[in-house]
């Protein structure tokens, strides 16, 4: 049994999440927080899950990111046929993960597809049992479209043995997250292992949370968790400086995120939709919060002195993790709205 201190020690300066930590993750069932209990998952409510994500990110950035993205991929247990979900998740160590990009094609042949392509940024790649991917559907090599002339996209689940991992992660942070590219060449996948994001075979409140809201809030608690860890390490370097206002701000914004989560769950429990206006409000809050948080982390970092630049220091690792994670396009404001003068 590992505690947070043990996990941090394992991952300080690490380039991969250790087998010891992965084993602990499986023992706790953390990859299955969004998997329904009927499939052997933990079946967390949204708020409960976000609290867990915050704690994991606060422990270590790569650790929290890998758990968030892979548990998020295991969420697709809800989108696949129940008999397939039961079969896949009968394995206590099942771990989905992949890329949100459309990186290849799926040539339809009766009830199977032939998958080919390259996908980037598959977090947790060294630990996955199955890769998830999005591909354009083709027939006789031609991309097919719907009635609105939009390309038809399906998602697929492919066993790790049929994918080739390309260990090409060179970013300054999240070094242990295992965020690699992968290719698939002429792999035949039965249509039972394909799915569509917004089509569910389960009937839970979690199914009805708009994907945009789910993505926004799961990322926000990660950033807040990493920020909480950052200020903890900053205090160790400069204990004479009071960072209490930073800590209070993290706590206040975490409370706000959890309040939003409860509001979303309450609306859905009353069979009410999350309006486009509400979704935009949540997203705008996220964009503004990350801008403010990033500026404050930079301000704190400039107060820590040369020790904070030592590449083997904990505070440097957390700093790099945060600014790597926030390069995710989700909350990036338009450059047209920014003033770069000084």
Image: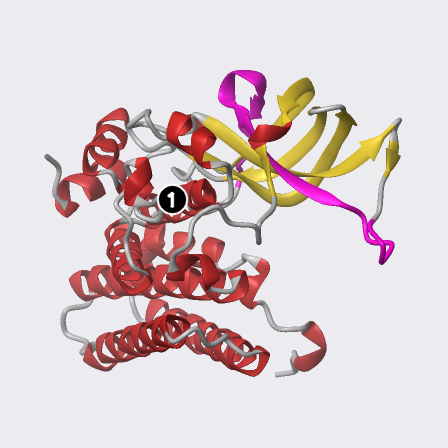
| 55 vs 248, nearest the viewer | 55
224 up-or-down from 91: above or below: below
Q: Which residues are magenta?
A: 146-170
Q: How far across and down, in percent of the image, does residue 170 sit?
A: 53, 38
Is 40 magenta? The answer is no
Q: Quadrant of residue 249?
A: bottom left
Q: Is residue 241 left or right of residue 334?
A: left
> How crowded is the residue under tag 1: few (<14 C-alpha within 10 Å), some, or many (20+)?
many
Residue 38: % across, % down = 30, 40
Q: Is residue 210 above or below residue 89?
A: below
Q: Secondary structure at mark 1?
A: helix
Instruction: Name the side, left or right, on which 256 lies relative to 98.
Output: left
Q: Is residue 307 visible?
A: no
Residue at 37% in and 70% down: 297
Q: Quadrant of residue 332?
A: bottom right
Q: Is residue 328 above or below residue 151?
A: below
Q: Give the residue drawn at x 43%, y 73%.
A: 271
Image quadrant holding the N terminus, namely top left
The residue lying toward the viewer, choosing from 88 and 224, is 88
Q: Is residue 154 magenta?
A: yes
Q: Give the left or right position of residue 252, taking residue 151 as reference.
A: left
Q: How is the image coloured?
A: secondary structure
Identify the residue at image location x=59%, y=60%: 329
Percent across and percent down for residue 83 are: 44, 30
Residue 8 percent across, percent down from the top left: 21, 43
Q: Visible in this render: residue 40?
A: yes
Q: Quadrant of the C terminus?
A: bottom right
Q: Is residue 211 above or below residue 189?
A: below
Q: Residue at x 61, y 45 (%)?
A: 196
In the picture of the structure, the residue carrying the numbered disc 1 is 71
């Amino acid at each position: 049994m590992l505690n947070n201190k043990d996990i941090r020690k394992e991952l300080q300066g690490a380039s991969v999440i250790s087998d010891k930590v992965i084993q602990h993750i499986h023992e706790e069932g953390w990859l299955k927080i969004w998997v329904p209990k009927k499939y052997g998952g933990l079946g967390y409510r949204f708020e409960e899950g976000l609290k867990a994500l915050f704690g994991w990110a606060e422990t270590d950035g790569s650790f929290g990111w890998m758990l968030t993205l892979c548990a998020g991929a295991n969420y697709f247990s809800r989108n696949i046929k129940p008999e397939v979900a039961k079969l896949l998740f009968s394995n206590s160590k099942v771990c989905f993960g992949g890329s949100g990009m459309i990186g290849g094609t799926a040539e339809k042949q009766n009830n199977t597809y032939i998958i080919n392509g390259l996908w980037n940024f598959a977090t947790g790649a060294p630990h996955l049992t199955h890769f998830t991917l999005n591909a354009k559907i083709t027939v006789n090599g031609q991309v097919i479209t719907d009635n609105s002339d939009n390309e038809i996209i399906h998602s697929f689940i492919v066993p790790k043995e049929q994918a080739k991992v390309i260990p090409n992660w060179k970013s300054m942070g999240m070094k242990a997250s295992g965020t690699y590219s992968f290719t698939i060449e002429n792999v035949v996948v039965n249509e039972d292992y394909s799915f569509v994001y917004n089509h569910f075979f389960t009937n839970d409140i979690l199914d009805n949370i708009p994907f945009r809201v789910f993505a926004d809030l799961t990322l926000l608690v990660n950033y807040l968790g990493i920020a909480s860890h950052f200020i903890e390490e900053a205090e160790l370097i400069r204990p004479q400086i009071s960072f209490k206002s930073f800590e209070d701000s993290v706590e206040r914004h975490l409370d706000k995120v959890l309040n939003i989560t409860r509001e979303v769950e309450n609306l859905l429990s009353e069979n009410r939709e999350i309006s486009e206006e509400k979704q935009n409000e949540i997203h705008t809050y996220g964009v503004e919060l990350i801008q403010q948080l990033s500026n404050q982390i930079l301000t704190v970092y400039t107060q820590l002195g040369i020790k904070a630049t030592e590449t083997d220091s904990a505070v440097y690792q957390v700093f790099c993790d945060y600014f790597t994670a926030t390069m995710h396009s989700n909350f990036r404001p338009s450059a047209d709205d920014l003033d770069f003068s000084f």
